[in-house]
Image (cartoon, coloured by chain):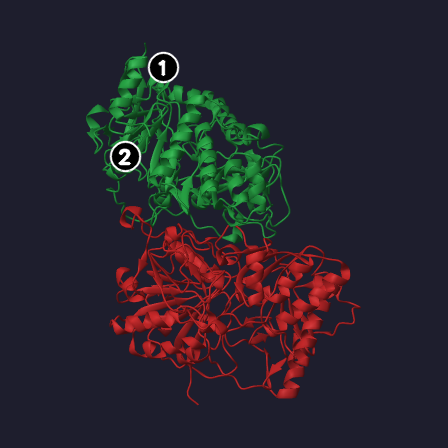
Chain colours: A red, B green
């Protein structure tokens, strides 16, 4: 393997092949231009489908058999059921019982509930995951125990990979909170309501075979059609898609940590002072504790100034829907819902609009929505002195998180990483990130409880903060401050074995994750 | 040419090649199953688009030049501007001025205003039309004056042809009543409002290059995004997309002809008596005078029985929105708007839902929405004694109409052709249709002012009408009755030259139209 490595434009050594398929090393932001055409799935004919439109199949197993499930296939799932998902696990239970091997699992994200799949990764039912690997699944990967190399992509990178034919989906399984017998579906109602089904949209359009699984079969037509039955092969009914209390968290909660509240307040103040937020701005809000607090502070700023946010991109929470209700936000474009209040809002408010991941994040589109976002606040596991960011591995080298929309959001006009300067006495600012997920040229500001570092490339922001009284420091100063308190952490140790590839938004390989060495 | 003709499954002689491209003869309803994959357009990258998202180009000419307009290209337009369209004509004015030749025009329909293009068909700027040819454009075609062979498709056949790669669109031009600088667009507002942009949806997804033309540039984001800017290359602003009074007709009017009112009333009565319409039925309504009258009679039936129509598929008029308002219709799925009241409804009523033509009509889908429609009423230029239908040529052999959604609607559970028994003393029921557009096995009932003919294949309906008092006759009886009044018309005379091909919903060739012979 080693002789096939090349140094990519970010200075990282990456392979030219992953799992036997050629890959393209990262070439720099905006440098790789794809050739050829988009992928397109096989042609269907309605003549091969029931003329009464009833595609209901007796069981998920029957639907998988009808779809021709066999060794080596790629199975896609989406993560709207989050940590309450029964469906993805059930697919692989069935595959295992059928003796199927070497499946590629292509989820839009994985959660702790998917640890259930570890035995199938061990016994070869699943050869590898292309998606996110969190917690024990990530640890399993980091220990070099996955049969093939994992591939991590951003949410937008996943849509790009599907569109470009990098990943051809044999069977897409859509867990649908409401569906009719034709396969028209949405996430708006039923015991497992998820609000939207945005992450399943590309899978449905590009997969060879599509199975809709629902615990809420409604009469034709299921409206609005977030998923169009025209793309669906079979519909399966089950008792329960998942655990409702783990699908939607009920009520999202702002952080109570005093340090994190300071970070949030400082971020909002910085954005107001520098003019990053203004009347008519476009913002992206997350659902992490700090992000929610930032949203709440921004809400106050909007109200105080009599301003409106033109568009809030969600991950949607009650903090955004509250702005919609009181007129401080004009529109929510929603790819994912985090609380029950947001589902109510989707059902009732015409300015709360479901939005596909392809539309906001796919880099291989005729433009990039993410570039219109005035302000995004993100987290990270590490930031280095060149402002490079890591979101997938921890300081011990273990792969513990997915990329999510993080890489895609870096294209916002102002990308702010808001995070505590250290966690469990491990500083987050390092000399060089363990795993490179985002190049420093796209990260503008680091806000910590002990000060704000502005990327030297952003001379405009450095100029604007002069005289603001905001605690602006260099990133080196922040790093030294953390190390003075916590000491300089040991570097993680790795073997040569590549266990995972990190794709950039354009499908090139920006870095790899290696097996952690035994202590 | 003649030696290459074959007799297709409908008994019509058709060529194996049209314009140098191989074609497949009609094989019977549901018999042709396509192989291979859908078409997919070239891969874009947002790195090649302006990072501020502003795609506004100075003029339509500049946008066409940027799109690489050159000889032999395929230019698609949609017909939401109907007979008020300035945009399609402007494209070819520009092409002509640039000396471009041999363009294929691929409109979703043409109108009298497009007679403007005849000089460009004569001088070779446009080589041929694949779409509908109405009035003078059809006459021009019938006279054998088009440089290449015209191709007529149903609305659904057009989406199938785009999807299957039968027609690869080089440049799609979308006339958008509202658009933002990124190209997000809808038909809901502005001086040229069309309500929906359903006919442009497939063009935008599959074309190599997409130009949005608007007379109503709004600030980002233009919501809802009926057209997603992610698929758009350039945005052009113009003073006026078209003549508002010819885009939407203001108020749609029911026929005042006593004969046609009788036909409409008898159709509604027939549907009620036979149980074709019932509480929860799905219907398609048109905008012709008879169709509107049928809708109004059905409305009365619904109210009298306390029934609801579950879904009305539009072509939407105030007769449908009225049912939505008073609760006799639950949902409108809308592909096209015919009056200003329908635009109001689309803007205000969440149960009035824009719907793409691909979703309702594309035969190469995983199912066929049209099959769920309980009742559709259609017109025709001729019906023959085998219930075969013609909608494109008149009794004089001239090509004067497009197919529209007619072929697609034939798949409804009950297809009713409602029409006067003769027009200008020419009987509509003939021994054999001049041009075969729809096979008789799909046409269930003919309703005329002088009686109702039921297809002998529909023994169920024949059984149900017994004792109804409805004037049920055989189709031969209807034909003889008409001929007793009008005499038997002369058959039109043709040369051997094929001037147009008629595609079936699956892309096969069901018939051809020949040049009319000089008298």
| Nearer the observer, B116 or A18 | B116
How far apart are the alpha carbons under marks 2 and 1? 31 Å
User: Dot 1: within a 10 Å radius of its alpha carbon, few (fewer than 14), some, or many (20 or more) residues?
Assistant: some
Q: Is residue A510 left or right of residue B149?
A: right
Query: Against B254, is B236 above or below?
Result: below
Q: Is residue A239 left or right of residue B22?
A: right
Residue identified by numbered label 2: B466
Q: Residue furthest right?
A: A467
> Which of disc 1 and disc 2 is earlier in sequence?
1
Locate the C terminus of chain B by quadrant.
top left
Q: Is residue A491 left or right of residue A304?
A: left
Rendering quarter of residue A369 = bottom right
Residue B154, image x and y in percent?
A: 37, 35
Instruction: Name the chain under label 1.
Output: B
Which residue corresponds to the image point at 37% horizontal and 46% vertical from the top-left?
A: B369
Rendering quarter of residue B417 = top left
User: Dot 2: within a 10 Å radius of its alpha carbon, few (fewer than 14), some, or many (20 or more) residues?
Assistant: few
Residue A401, image x and y in percent?
A: 49, 74
Residue A159, image x and y in percent?
A: 45, 59
Q: Residue furthest top?
A: B519
Which residue corresponds to the image point at 24% horizontal and 23% vertical from the top-left?
A: B476
- Residues at discs 2 and 1 in contact (Cβ within 8 Å): no
Which residue corresponds to the image point at 58% horizontal and 57% vertical from the top-left?
A: A348
Tag of residue A136: none
Quick check: can you spot residue B492? Answer: no
Which residue corresponds to the image point at 61% horizontal and 34% vertical from the top-left?
A: B238
Classify mark 1: helix, strand or loop.
loop
Asked if both marks, 2 and 1, belong to the same chain, the answer given is: yes
Rendering quarter of residue A212 = bottom left
Residue identified by numbered label 1: B425
Residue A324, image x and y in percent?
A: 65, 59
Classify mark 2: helix, strand or loop.
loop
């Amino acid at each position: 393997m080693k002789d096939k490595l090349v140094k990519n434009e970010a200075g990282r050594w990456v392979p030219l092949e992953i799992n036997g398929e050629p890959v393209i090393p990262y070439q720099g932001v905006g440098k790789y231009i794809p050739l050829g055409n988009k992928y397109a799935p096989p042609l269907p004919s309605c003549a091969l489908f029931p003329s009464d439109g009833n595609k209901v199949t007796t069981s998920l197993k029957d639907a998988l058999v009808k779809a021709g499930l066999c060794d080596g296939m790629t199975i896609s799932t989406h993560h709207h059921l989050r940590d309450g998902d029964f469906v993805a696990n059930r697919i692989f239970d069935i595959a295992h019982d059928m003796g199927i091997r070497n499946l590629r699992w292509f989820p839009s994200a994985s959660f702790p509930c998917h640890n259930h799949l570890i035995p199938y990764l061990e016994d070869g039912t699943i050869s590898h995951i292309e998606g996110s690997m969190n917690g024990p699944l990530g640890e399993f990967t980091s220990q070099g125990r996955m049969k093939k190399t994992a591939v991590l992509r951003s949410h937008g990178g996943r849509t790009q990979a599907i569109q470009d034919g990098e990943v051809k989906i044999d069977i897409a399984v859509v867990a649908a909170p409401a569906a009719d017998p034709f396969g028209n579906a949405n996430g708006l109602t039923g015991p497992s309501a998820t609000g939207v089904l945005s992450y399943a949209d590309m899978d449905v359009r590009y997969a060879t075979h599509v199975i809709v699984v629902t615990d809420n079969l409604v009469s034709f037509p299921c409206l609005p059609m977030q998923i169009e039955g025209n793309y669906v092969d079979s519909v399966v009914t089950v008792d329960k898609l998942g655990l409702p209390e783990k699908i939607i968290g009920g009520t999202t909660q702002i952080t109570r940590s005093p340090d994190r509240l300071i970070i949030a307040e400082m971020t909002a103040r910085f954005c107001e002072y520098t003019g990053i937020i203004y009347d008519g701005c476009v913002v992206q809000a997350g659902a992490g504790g700090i992000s929610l607090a930032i949203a709440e502070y921004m809400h106050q700023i909007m109200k105080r100034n009599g301003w409106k946010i033109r568009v809030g991109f969600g991950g949607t929470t009650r903090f955004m829907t509250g702005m919609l209700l009181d007129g401080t936000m004009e529109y929510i474009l929603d790819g994912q819902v985090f609380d029950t209040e947001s589902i109510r809002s989707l059902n009732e408010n015409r300015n709360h609009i479901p939005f596909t991941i392809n539309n906001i994040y796919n880099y291989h589109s005729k433009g990039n929505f993410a570039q219109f976002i005035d302000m995004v606040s993100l987290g990270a596991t590490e930031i280095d002195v060149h402002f490079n960011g890591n979101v997938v591995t921890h300081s011990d080298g273990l792969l513990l998180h997915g990329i999510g929309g993080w890489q895609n959001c870096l294209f916002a006009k102002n990308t702010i990483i808001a995070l505590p300067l250290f966690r469990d006495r491990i500083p987050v600012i390092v000399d060089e990130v363990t795993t490179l997920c985002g190049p420093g040229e796209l990260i503008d500001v680091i806000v910590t409880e002990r000060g704000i570092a502005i990327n030297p490339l952003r001379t405009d922001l450095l100029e604007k903060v002069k005289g603001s009284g905001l605690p602006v420091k260099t990133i080196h100063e922040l790093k030294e401050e953390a190390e003075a308190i916590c000491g300089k952490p040991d570097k993680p140790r790795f073997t040569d074995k590549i266990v995972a590839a990190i794709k950039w938004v354009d499908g090139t390989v920006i870095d790899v994750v290696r097996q952690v060495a035994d202590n």
